Structure formats: structure tokens, C-alpha cells
Image: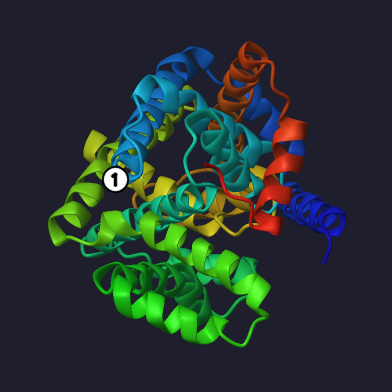
Amino acid sequence: MNGGKKLWVGFGLSALFLALFLFTLDLEHLLNALADANYWYVIPGIALYLVAVGFRTLRWQWLLRHIKPIPVARLFPVVVVGYMANNLLPMRLGELVRSYYVGEREQVSRTSALVTIFIERLLDALTLLLFICTIAIFVSLDTVIEVLAAELSIPWPLLIAAGSLPFVIGFGGLMLIAFAPGSARSLARLLIRPLPARFEETAMHIVDMFLQGVESLRKPTDILVLFLMSLPIWIFEAGLFYMIGFSFGLHHLYDSQLEMIVAMVLVTAIANIGSSIPAAPGGVGLFEIIGTYTLVWLPLAAVDKEVAGAYIAVVHACLLIPMIGLGQVFLWAQHVSLRNLTRVGKQAVTEGEEAR
């Protein structure tokens, strides 16, 4: 499938999920909920999210440290631009944009940088799964899973497997490669050997850059540090969900603040994992469906469906719009366009081009 078709597939899926989300709600009631919300809580919510992005930058700095020490102040704009691209483009093209951009700015291997970004994604998913599993010990999630499975027309065992196994297997595979880089390189050379000689050197160079990218997973202590650094990222992002809850009066529906916090953490985790498929830009549509049904069917409180839908729509807007605006400011300051970053980034990966 060529790049143009991939773009249309991504936008098409987003439109489909968004239509499905709106079709299941009373639009008049939804608009009333949006009109009645207190949007002052958006300001501290977005502030908490920006703190989460700051912790993301610190974690990425740690992942890149064995490749090249890069100041956080220089990495932060790259992270924001990458999220901006993910919010605007389908198929997770923002990851390519971020790896290319950091390669150009800091003269590091784009392949190694892309591998560290992939590790980030796995760490995020595993951290969210840890949150879900911990809370599931005390709060039944059976109804939520069954409703989401029915709404997405997926058998619930398959839904659970698709939402967990790829991340567990992916991270485990990278750890094995990191623990035994020599064996991994020898296996890669064996697989590459049938290729024409003119391709073998380039292929092995890419393998070496890949191995450099997973070096942060070589020591158990480093893996532990990465997981510990992932916790504040999602705690502060859940803080955005929590603050926007006050905008819609959700705090009046729970018996205690602890129950509301638990609910917000669960919605944060399930919505982000469920909408992480590399298709729709920013997970638009799918994020709304999963977040709304999770909030409605959690046993902790009775939340009106339209209020939940309005709440999730505002939360998602707070996740998307600030990154798009801030990313554009950073690009303007550097006299760079997102279109060129995307085009050249895709070309560099396709051709196996490496930064110095």
C-alpha cells in the first residue's frame, strides 16, 4: 500500500469511528453538556499534561544517552513536534518525523532514535497495563470489557489479547536482543546473507544502529529506571483527565475523591491503549468510543452517556490541540515545515539513509 492510500485509510478509519461515536449519542444532550461545562479547569489540566510531556522528554533523554547526551531543552521541541505530527497524520507518522528531526538537529542515527521511540511506546503500554491490572484487583472490569467488545464487534478474549500481548511480546523480544546483541547480530547476518552483496553492508549498518537503539534495555537496573520514569508521565496525564472531570461535575457522582481518581486513571489507561493502533490521526474517534464506554460502564458511579461523551471529547481536544499549536510554534521558530519533515523522514527510512 503506497503512502497516499495509507493516509486515506487512516483518515477513513478516523471518520468511521467518529461517526460511530456520534451515532450512539443524543447530539442535543451532548451539545448541552458541552455548553454547561466549566472550562476554567481546562487550564490546570493542560498544565499537568505539559508536565507529563516534560517527563516524556526526560525519559527519552535517558534512552538516548548512550547514543549522544542531548540537553532536555533541545529534546523538548522535538518531542512536541513528534506528537504534533501524530495528532495530524495517520499511521503514527509522527514517530518517523521525530526520529528524522532529532537526527537532523543532533546528528544521531535515525534508526537508533526510531528504536528508542518504539521502546517508549512499549513502556507506555506496559505501564498502563500495570495500572489496569492493579486497579482490577479491587474494581470489577468485566462489564466494561464486555461492552467494549460488543461495541467494537470483537470477542472479549481477542480484545484482551490484542490490548496486551503485542506489547508484552514486543518488549520481551527487545530485551532478549539487548541482552544478547552478539547473537542477534550473527542471526541478522545469517538472514541477510542471501541478499546481493551491494545491500549487505547497508543492511548490517541498519542492524548495528538498531542494536545501538536497544542498548538501554541491556541492564535490569536501567529497565527498572525506565519504568519508574514512566509512572509520573501517566500520573500527570491522568491529572488532565481528573481536572476536566470537574468541568463536567463528575466529582458529584463519586462517593469519594479516591473513587474518582481510580476512575480517571482507568479511563486514561484503557482509552490510550485502545486507541494506540497506528491508523487514525491522534486516535480520533476510537479514543472517544473507548473512553466514553469505559466511563459509563465502570461500576464506581452512574455517568450519563452524553455527559461522558462530552467529557471525553474535551479531554481529547486538550491532548491534541496544545501539542499542535506548540509544535507549530517550534517549527516556525526553526523555519521548518511539517510537510517537508514528513516527506523527507519517510524517504530517509525507505532508503535506509542514516544521519552521521
Which residue is located at x 55 percent, y 55 percent?
Answer: 276
Where 346 falls versus 51 (above or below)?
below
The picture quadrant where one finds residue 160 is bottom left
- Depth check, front residue: 166 or 244: 166
Q: Residue at x 29, y 45 (%)?
A: 66
Image: 151 above or below 317: below
Query: Where residue 178 sits: x, y (%)?
Result: 30, 67
Quarter-of-image position of residue 147 = bottom right
User: Could you say which is closer to the camera, residue 347 or residue 18?
Assistant: 347
Where is residue 72 shown, x and y percent of the image? 35, 25
Circle 1 sits in a helix, a strand or a loop, which is it? loop
Q: Is residue 129 above or below residue 227?
A: below
Kindly give the residue lying farthest to the front in the view shown: 197
Instruction: Determine the residue positioned at 57% across, 19% down.
Output: 326
**Residue located at (66% from left, 48% from top):** 93
* Residue pointed to by mark 1: 66
Q: Quadrant of the N terminus?
A: bottom right
The picture quadrant where one finds residue 232 is top left
Question: Is residue 296 shown to the viewer in this render?
Answer: no
User: Does 339 sit above or below residue 262?
Assistant: above
Return the x and y of residue 138 as percentages of the image width and height: 21, 60
Instruction: Indicate the colouring scheme.
Output: rainbow
How crowded pointer 1 is (Cα within 10 Å; few <14, some 14-19, many 20+) is rated as few
How far from the left and from the top, in percent, is residue 246?
A: 42, 25
User: Quick check: 298 left or right of 13?
Assistant: left
Residue type pointed to by label 1? His
Query: Left or right: where does residue 183 sit relative to residue 206?
Result: left
Q: Is residue 121 visible?
A: yes
Q: Is residue 98 left or right of residue 244?
A: right
